[in-house]
């Protein structure tokens, strides 16, 4: 079974959805699943460096006030905690995620894409790392076992920029409006951080259909 997932490393629902899918798959151990992480930028025009914290960034983006943004994130932190994630929103550093997506493509080629995705999400939401900075991204890459020189060259030469753009264009052709978006066997779509039970039911039905 192939599951393609469009998501952004700056997307809290994407991290929560990842955990829900993982929990569902652990309860369906007989499924042979290939997960492919696809690129999607929530804000492709976001600057790499920003003087605004996450609350002011969201308030500005949605035309609301800071208190609204803080309340929304408080709810998000609780939702994350319910699935075992420790979001540290006060330390989140808003940035552009394009280069992070490039390294995800490198990691895919090296058989380490899921490790890279997890490391990037954790760096952004839990560890307060600046995932727009080259040195931070290179360190994350080497921490999961990628070659430092390979990571540096990718970021220096924009080696996977075309693949990132292609992923985004493919999402648009599929009508993806929000992420995470889970595309199973290039036929079935699930949008959002669905509950574990929804993932389990969908994956079981699709696997049974394939067998029959």
Image (tube, rainbow, N blue to C red):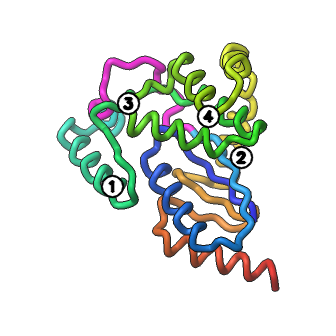
Residue located beneath label 2 in the image = 170
Q: Quadrant of residue 129?
A: top left
Q: Earlier in the sequence, mark 2 or mark 4?
A: 4
Of helix, strand and loop, which mostly describes the magenta segment? loop
Residue 98 visible in the displayed image: no
Q: Earlier in the sequence, mark 3 or mark 1?
A: 1
Q: Residue at x 70, y 76 (%)?
A: 206
**Does 47 lie within the magenta span?**
yes
Residue located beneath label 4 in the image = 144
Q: Earlier in the sequence, mark 1 or mark 4?
A: 1
Residue 39 visible in the displayed image: yes
Q: Earlier in the sequence, mark 2 or mark 3?
A: 3
**Label 3 neighbourhood size at 10 Å, few (<14), some (14-19), many (20+)?**
some
The CA distance from mark 2 to mark 3 is 31 Å
The CA distance from mark 4 to mark 3 is 18 Å
**Does 44 lie within the magenta span?**
yes
**Label 2 neighbourhood size at 10 Å, few (<14), some (14-19), many (20+)?**
some
Residue located beneath label 1 in the image = 81
Q: Are discs 4 and 3 less than 8 Å apart at CB? A: no
The CA distance from mark 2 to mark 4 is 28 Å
Q: Which stretch is magenta?
A: 41-56
Q: Are discs 2 and 3 less than 8 Å apart at CB? A: no
């Amino acid at each position: 079974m192939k599951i393609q997932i469009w998501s952004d490393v700056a997307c809290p629902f994407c991290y929560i959805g990842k955990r829900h899918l993982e929990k569902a798959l652990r309860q369906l151990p007989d499924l042979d699943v290939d997960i492919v992480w696809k690129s999607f930028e929530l804000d492709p025009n976001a600057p790499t460096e920003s003087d605004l914290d996450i609350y002011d960034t969201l308030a500005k983006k949605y035309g609301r006030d800071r208190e609204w943004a803080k309340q929304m994130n408080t709810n998000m932190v609780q939702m994350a905690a319910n699935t075992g994630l420790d979001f540290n929103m006060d330390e989140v550093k808003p940035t552009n995620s394009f280069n992070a997506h490039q390294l995800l493509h490198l990691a895919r080629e090296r058989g380490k894409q899921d490790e890279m995705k997890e490391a990037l999400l954790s760096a952004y939401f839990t560890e307060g790392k600046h995932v727009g900075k080259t040195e931070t991204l290179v360190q994350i890459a080497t921490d999961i076992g990628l070659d430092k020189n390979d990571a540096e060259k990718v970021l220096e030469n924009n080696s996977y920029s075309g693949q990132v753009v292609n992923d985004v264009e493919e999402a648009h052709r599929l009508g993806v409006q929000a992420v995470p978006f889970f595309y199973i066997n290039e036929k079935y779509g699930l949008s959002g951080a669905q509950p574990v039970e929804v993932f389990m039911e969908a994956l079981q039905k699709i696997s049974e259909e394939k067998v029959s």
